[in-house]
Amino acid sequence: MSSKLYLSFFMLVMIGCIVSVSSHKTVHIVGDNLGWILPKYTGFYNDWAKKRKFCVGDKLLFNYKPGLNTVVQVEKEDYDHCSMKNTLAQYFMGNTTLTLNNCGDYYFICSVGKHCEASQKLKITVT
C-alpha cells in the first residue's frame, strides 16, 4: 500500500471513530430502579447525578405514575426554594423523556404536595 493510500485509509478510520463516539448518546434513567418518586433519603437524586456525566444530546428518563408525581423544570431559585415562580416546563402524564439540548445546569422538582421539600428534586450539569 502506498503511503498516500495508507494515510487516506487511516484518516477515514479516524473520522469514522470520531463520528461514532460523538453520536453516541446516553439515556439516563433518573433514580435507576427507584424511578422518580419520593427518595429513600435526602440528597438521593443529587447523589445519583454525581455518579454520571451528562452531555448535550443525552436524554433523561423520569419514570413515574401520573397523578402521584410530576416533573417540573425550574430555575435555580425555584429549585432552592421548592417553588414554581419561573417554571420552564411541566410534565404530569407519566414517564417522561427529556433531551438535554444545551450545556449548563438543569433543575427539576416534583410539584406534588411537599415532595420537593422531601428532596424529590434533581440538579444536573450538562457539558
Image (tube, rainbow, N blue to C red):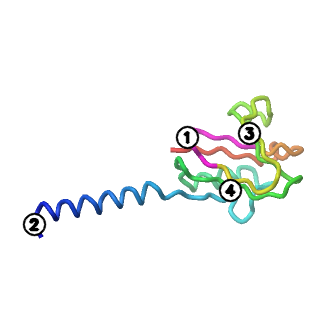
Q: Which residue is mark 4?
A: 61
Q: Residues within 10 Å of mark 1 (few under 14, many from 20)?
A: some
Magenta portion: prevailing SS class: strand
Do the numbered discs 1 and 3 sit on residues whose CB atoms are within 8 Å? no
| 2 and 1 marks in contact (CB < 8 Å) | no
**Mark 2: amino acid:** Ser
Distance (Cα) linking label 2 and label 1: 44 Å
User: Sequence-wise, which precedes: disc 2 or disc 1?
Assistant: 2
User: Where residue 89 is drawn, which disc sits there?
Assistant: 3
Secondary element at tag 2: loop
Q: Amino acid at mark 4?
A: Leu
Cα gap from disc 3 to disc 2, whole angstroms: 57 Å
Q: Which residue is mark 1?
A: 102
Q: Where is residue 1 shown, x and y percent of the image? A: 12, 70
70 sits left or right of 46 in the view: right
Tag 3 secondary structure: strand
Looking at the rendering, which quadrant does residue 6 occupy? bottom left
| Residue sitting at x 84%, y 51% | 69
Name the side, left or right, on which 31 lies relative to 4. Answer: right
Tell which circle, 3 or 2, labels the residue nearer the N-terminal end: 2
| Residue highlighted by disc 2 | 2
